[in-house]
Amino acid sequence: MEAADEADLLILDAIDAPPPGAESLASGRDAIIRAVKHAPAGPGVYRMIAADSSVLYVGKAKSIRKRVLSYTRPVGHTNRIARMIAATASMEFVSTRTEPEALLLEANLIKQLKPRFNVLLRDDKSFPYILITADHVAPQITKHRGARNRPGDYYGPFASVWAVDRTINALERAFLLRSCSDSYYENRTRPCLLHQIKRCAGPCTGEVSHTDYAELVREARAFLSGRSRAVKEELALEMEAASQELEFERAARLRDRLAALSAVQGSQGINPRGVEEADVFACHQQGGATCVEVFFFRTGQNWGNRAYYPRADRSLSEAEVLGAFLAQFYEDKPCPRLILLSHKVEEQALLAEALSEKTGHRIEIAAPQRGEKRDLVDHALQNAREALARTLAESATQTKLLEGVAATFGLKAPPQRIEVYDNSHIMGTNAVGGMIVAGPEGFRKSQYRKFNIKSADIVPGDDFGMMREVLRRRFSRLLKEAPRDGAGEGGDAGGVQELDATGGDIGPASEAQSTQAPSPAVMPGLEPGIHAGSMAMRVEDSSRPRGEDGRDEPGHDGDLSGAIAPTQVEATPLIVEPDTPPASDPEEAEALPDTSEASPWPDLVLIDGGLGQLNAARTVLDELGITDVPLVGIAKGLDREAGREQFFLPGRTPFRMEPRDPVLYFIQRLRDEAHRFAIGSHRARRKKDITEAGLQAIAGVGPTRKRALLRHFGTLKAIERASLADLEQVAGINAATAKAVYDYFHERPPG
């Protein structure tokens, strides 16, 4: 499960899916034929909708009408297309001005709606950048992720936070820029440790003038902008001049800075000479799975790589997957001027035109055949092969572990979704419940959830009551949004938000991409180039579920109204010749990915606790009428020793596993991950409470004394660690107040 720590990693096992029957295929063709009559003739995007209102497929075309007509052929479809046609109940169309606009809109809708017959990019994270701020007299260097709201210069993207931290560490040694926050900077009265170890020039206390510090910032910006050779030559000249003037200490500092710059460049791996800015994509397929490896080159340096595992039908070629992947990849990311590919994609010129229109400058997309650029692609392709081989091997190991879990706990089949629950609090304060999710592909961090415990009926410190509240909220919501009888039938059950949002205190653990439909008031994913003059049209099928007022039942993906008003058209059946069953081609009936979303119902629930916790969980599920969810309690061993855990199951005698059983190690990892997540959520909430209340929550400490303490110690953490004697030395703080501050932080157990 190590490789599964990336939330974007998901490989679905392939299953053999038979071709659809003639009757279902004819029904789908009839719905498409009714839609053809109203399909626009120009460029745009079309959506194929199932009977339950879930989106099956999003496509774009230069002529929507011609493309939709191609689906009405009675024969000649692959197994995948035939299944898609058979499931279609209606279609929706959106016209755009140009084909590049249609390509961008298609990528937006695929990311938002997650149709099961499209290639899906599993990526719920933005890339980290290095930011040198421009809103302070002494600019700060820091890592940044998300919207670029703060003034300054952004450098990236980097493939991981680890790569950013490593680079910032080296840049601090090379340019001595501060990385502290502005509030920390303003409250310093003496240089911090970073200045002592020569990783900061110390502008906060005047160790360096603002003019000299600005020169350091200029050099750092020049280095990150690609002018590294010029910067190194300047430092070398300064070092030689200092040495000739017998300023050996200054020469030694410059020497250390030069060494740090060399370390930055040397740690970047392969650094191409002829490629200043490019993204390199390599696609490899094996065992029905696909891996896309991406390398980022900026300022002539390798800034890291990342492997993606898109969900795709195994009948699609590497070039087809790569083409669909690219459009989605740059939907919310900056695009470099050069994109190198391992395979030539079908609509390469169109994609380049669309990205050029989006970015405002020319984008070149190429599949090089020789030279240095080809070497970069080959290097990325080798990494893709190795990454996919590792993932397939880990997937096989994971499958064996899940089979062992099923055998140990008496499950009918290996669990596909395991939920683990734990609580964390200090004497009942800032109580938080945590839920983690794991499956065949590892930890599903985008589905982690936290529950802030606020029930007034729970006595502080009542772990059983907290567990009851967490499970009641979790499964009550699940019963409401995905009833057990219908789970897994609609194709969209996996997109249910499990938690009760009414309390306003529950939220996802990470930035998971929403699978809900876009708001009816706004055109989803509308690019700046697609204006309100574009036309939207929907073609309705009489079989679509309706409410009493004739509108769509909740759960439909939303009207295309607001900025672009939809045109409602009555579906008029056309007289057509009877359908001919599709040809049965054994080569086409190959295994297909299980593209339906997994059920949100757990196959196994693990509770971090003994018999009491298990009984509390069982009580809640019995009250809700849930009897088919297996429950297991995990009690820590004697003296909380790992390997001595005792397992409690309803109706079974408690037991232990063999100390070196791989399944035991697997369960321990799940338990420890839930523990880590719950404690982290609790500490974040406690820290927020302390920060919001501040020192003013302490009796006798007002704004004036608060400022005096912060001015003396610099941070709240330093005040918390200060001794009573140190507190009494602060100007304006008497002995009684110092004792109150000390007791506030030390009488309670630490977090």
Image: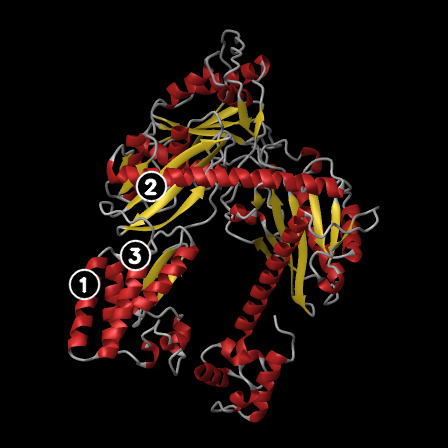
In the displayed structure, 707 sits above or below 277; it is below
Identify whether 657 is placed above or below 721. above
Q: Nearer the viewer, residue 345 or 554?
A: 345
Q: What residue is disc 1 on? A: 233
Q: Which residue is mark 2?
A: 280
The kind of residue tagged 1 is Glu
N-term mark: 1 or 2? 1
Q: CA distance from mark 1 to mark 2?
A: 30 Å
User: Which dot, 1 or 2, sits closer to the camera?
Assistant: 1
Which of the marked residues, 3 or 1, is nearer the chain's N terminus?
A: 1
In this image, 29 relative to 175: left or right? right
The residue that mark 3 highlights is 265
Q: Secondary structure at mark 3?
A: helix
The colour scheme used to paint the residues is secondary structure
Could you tell me which secondary element the residue under label 1 belongs to?
A: helix
Asked if residue 642 shows in the view, the reply is yes
- Residue at position x 40%, y 35% in the image: 283
Which one is nearer the viewer's eye here, 191 or 93? 191
